[in-house]
Amino acid sequence: MLDLGRLRALHAVWVHGSVAAAAVALGYTPSAVSQQITKLERETRASLLERRGRGVALTEEGLHLAATARELLAIVERAETVMEERRGKPAGRLTVAAFPSAARGLLPGVLARLERAHPGLDVRMTEVDPHLSIDLVARGTTDLAVAHDWDIAPLPAPEGVEQAVIGDDLCDLLVPEGHPFAGRSAVRREELAGERWICQPPGTVCHDWLIRTLRTAGCEPDLVHQAEENHTQVALVAAGLGIAVMPRLGRGALPAGVVAVTLDPVPRRRLYALWRARAARRPAIGAAVTALQEHFIRLDSTLAPDPSPPSTRSTVPPSAPSPASSPVTAPAPFAASAPDRPNS
């Protein structure tokens, strides 16, 4: 009889594209994943992986077996959901994929709450780009994804995936202290012509949002510095090298020399939790989504506007609208119409 754990390892390599990525998703070392697949090859008397350059690819036999493994894992998930539901409390392993600023600004509090409230629940979190995390949920390798969408880059939920709104994360205009905008209560987009910008590299949502938004407002952006990390962008603003637009979640306190100013209209991104429909009745899913929604509401106080004048201000504004109250019913389409939204 084929070992389910070894089939799971092969399926993970198929989904994630490499042994190393599969190991991260499963919480194993790459050598452990390789050993599982080697044993599976002995059991099946077939070669399941082949070398392709510096990586590996599934052979024809491997692809057939991985597809079968997907069906078996779906059956196991349904059985586990039924048993957990009968017990009436969250238990077992729950894997979560979250985009970077949510992993930093939202998940630590949520994970700590779940650990305290449900000792039988083993939650494992991985930082993943939102465009990838939804596919991981759909393919069955991740139980829950925390993702976001923007008006210029909607992320449609695949068939068989349900979702709930966590909340809206607002964005601010970050400027150096002493900048003409620093003492303003709000700045309109039409006033941004001629500014030097700091943003993420091309191909990212924030970069594309900035280009499109400024051009729509009649401004051709001058992108002087590009950096993936938000903290790097903040440091460049603090040095007086330009201005930036940045979400509040996970941003942390701003250093001396950086002022957050409201941009009118306010850009925002909408956060979602997504899970497979067949696991919707699992208590662990409901508990995790509820914890995400409620903890996001609690973050309102830490993200509230700082009433101090620009010269003394080191933290930033806002308040996100209250999220949907029901954790396990799919709301409006994932690409719901919403105000302007950028960044990761």
Image: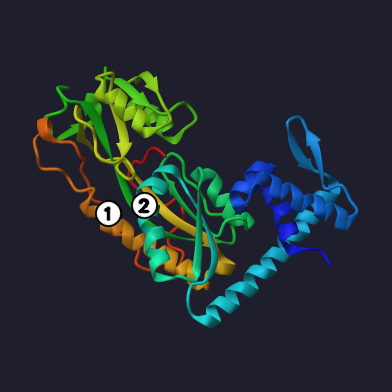
The residue at the point 39 percent across, 51 percent down is 271
Helix, strand or loop under label 1 = helix
Task: Identify the residue position indicated by label 1 in the image.
Answer: 299
Circles 1 and 2, Cβ within 8 Å, touching? The answer is yes
The x, y position of residue 81, in whole percent, is 58, 73
29 up-or-down from 288: above or below: above
The quarter of the rendered structure image containing the N terminus is bottom right
Horizontally, residue 42 falls left or right of residue 239, namely right
Whether residue 321 is visible, yes or no, is no
Whether residue 24 is visible, yes or no, is yes
Task: Identify the residue position indicated by label 2 in the image.
Answer: 106
Horizontally, residue 86 falls left or right of residue 318, namely right
Q: State which tag comes first along the sequence, 1 or 2.
A: 2
92 up-or-down from 310: above or below: below
The residue at the point 43 percent across, 70 percent down is 118
Per the model, the C-alpha gap separating discs 1 and 2 is 8 Å
Residue type at mark 1?
Answer: Leu
Helix, strand or loop under label 2 = loop
Q: Nearer the viewer, residue 72 or 253?
A: 253
Horizontally, residue 155 falls left or right of residue 1, namely left
The x, y position of residue 301, in whole percent, is 21, 53
The x, y position of residue 189, in whole percent, is 25, 30
Residue type at mark 2?
Answer: Leu
The residue at the point 26 percent across, 37 percent down is 172
Q: Nearer the viewer, residue 148 or 86?
A: 86
Q: Quadrant of residue 243?
A: top left
Task: Give neighbour class at mark 2: few <14, some 14-19, many 20+ (Cα, 10 Å).
Answer: many
Horizontally, residue 220 falls left or right of residue 29, namely left
Q: How many marks?
A: 2
